Amino acid sequence: MAYWLARTDSRHKNLLLMLVVLPLFVGNAVRAAGWMVVFGTKGAVNSLAGALGLVRQPLTIMYTEGAVIVGVVAINLPFMVLTLQSVIEGIDRSVEEAALGLAPDRWRCSVAPCSPWPCPACWPGRSCASSWPCTFVGQNNWPFGASLAFVLMTATLGLAVVSNVVVQRRYRR
């Protein structure tokens, strides 16, 4: 998906990117509740399977390893797609064409351009998207990350104190 988004010349590219980003606007708890509706004993999957006559009893999908994997992938997929898409867009198309000529098969460079073989041009994006915390593309800048965390924590605490004061003043009246 990231490769296709990076290489598409469609006029709808911004719309497609918004579809990738859209799940990030919904909280993780809401997304988890949505997956519970899909995978529950009376959920969409079991209802569809029952209506098609595929099962007589509801399947136990919730709280299984497969359901957890689907949930984790659904939460992390937008981050992975956006990171890889931006890295792939930075790779010159002539480098990709040269790699296609050197690759043992077309799959390794056209369909899976960010696999470890033979196209290492997007390793920084792959390593950043697949590891947590992101290592600032191989720089391991821990002091900068720590200072960003401190600024974020200070801003959050400051806003919490201000909102608490505003709410207390409003209820005193």
Image (tube, rainbow, N blue to C red):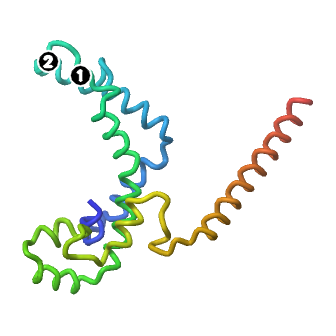
What mark, if any, has residue 29 been given in the picture?
none
- In this view, the residue farthest toward the left is 105
In-image side of 157 versus 53 (left or right): right
Distance CA(mark 2)–CA(mark 1):
8 Å
The one nearer the camera, 124 or 160, is 124
What residue is drawn where x is 73% and y is 55%? 155
The one nearer the camera, 130 or 101, is 130
What residue is drawn where x is 82% and y is 36%? 167
Q: Do labels 2 and 1 touch, CB within 8 Å?
A: yes
Image quadrant in which the N terminus is located? bottom left
**Residue on which disc 2 sits:** 55
Considering only vertical position in the picture, is 56 above or below 116? above
Mark 2 residue crowding within 10 angstroms, few (<14) / some (14–19) / many (20+): few
Considering only vertical position in the picture, is 24 above or below 106? above
**Residue on which disc 1 sits:** 46
Mark 1 residue crowding within 10 angstroms, few (<14) / some (14–19) / many (20+): many
In-image side of 24 versus 87 (left or right): right
Identify residue type, mark 2.
Val
What residue is drawn where x is 39% and y is 32%? 34
Label located before the other in sequence (2 or 1): 1
Query: Where residue 54 sits in the image (x, y, percent)?
Result: 11, 21
